[in-house]
Amino acid sequence: MALFKSKAEPAVTSSGACFGSQTRFEGEVISRSDLEIAGDIKGDIKTEGRVTLDAPGRIEGCIECAQYRHAGQAKGILRTTALAAFLPGSTWEGELYPGRLDISPGAVVQGKIVPGRV
């Protein structure tokens, strides 16, 4: 399954995808299901499912999803319709527009937070 395309053509998936720790991707990712990220992504991510960012993963861009679980490092804008959870040791810099928000002790979140709006 080809997930890597040019910026003019976003990567589209309907069965979920995993970006491993040795993966670097630049561009737009569009999915109808869950995404697991442990690598580096620079670009926008949009899915109807859940995005999981595991350490040592990094994201720089706009993320739109139903749920978000954050254990890595990210910078950008996050919009969720449900829960956005930030785990111990994770860092976030930017804007958050979560349906619900859970920031665990030890997580670092810097920027603008507007809960309950998407």
Image (cartoon, helix red, strand yellow):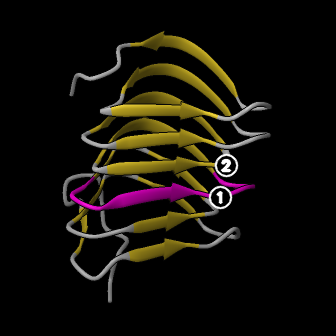
At 80% across and 31% down in the image, what residue appears?
106
Cα separation between marks 1 and 2: 5 Å
* Amino acid at the residue labelled 1: Asp
Q: Residues within 10 Å of mark 2 (few under 14, many from 20)?
A: many
Q: Residues within 10 Å of mark 1 (few under 14, many from 20)?
A: many
Which sits in the foreground, 106 or 19?
A: 106
- Residue at numbered disc 1: 54
Query: x, y percentage for residue 110?
Result: 61, 15
Task: Determine whether label 1 and label 2 are within 8 Å by CB.
Answer: yes
Quarter of the figure with the C terminus: top left
Region of the chain picked out in magenta, as a range: 47-57
SS for tag 2?
loop
The label shown at residue 71 is 2
Instruction: Tell how many labels.
Output: 2
Which callout, 1 or 2, points at the residue further toward the start of the chain?
Answer: 1
Which sits in the foreground, 23 or 63?
A: 63
Q: Residue furthest bottom?
A: 1
Left or right placement of residue 26 versus residue 50 in this view: right
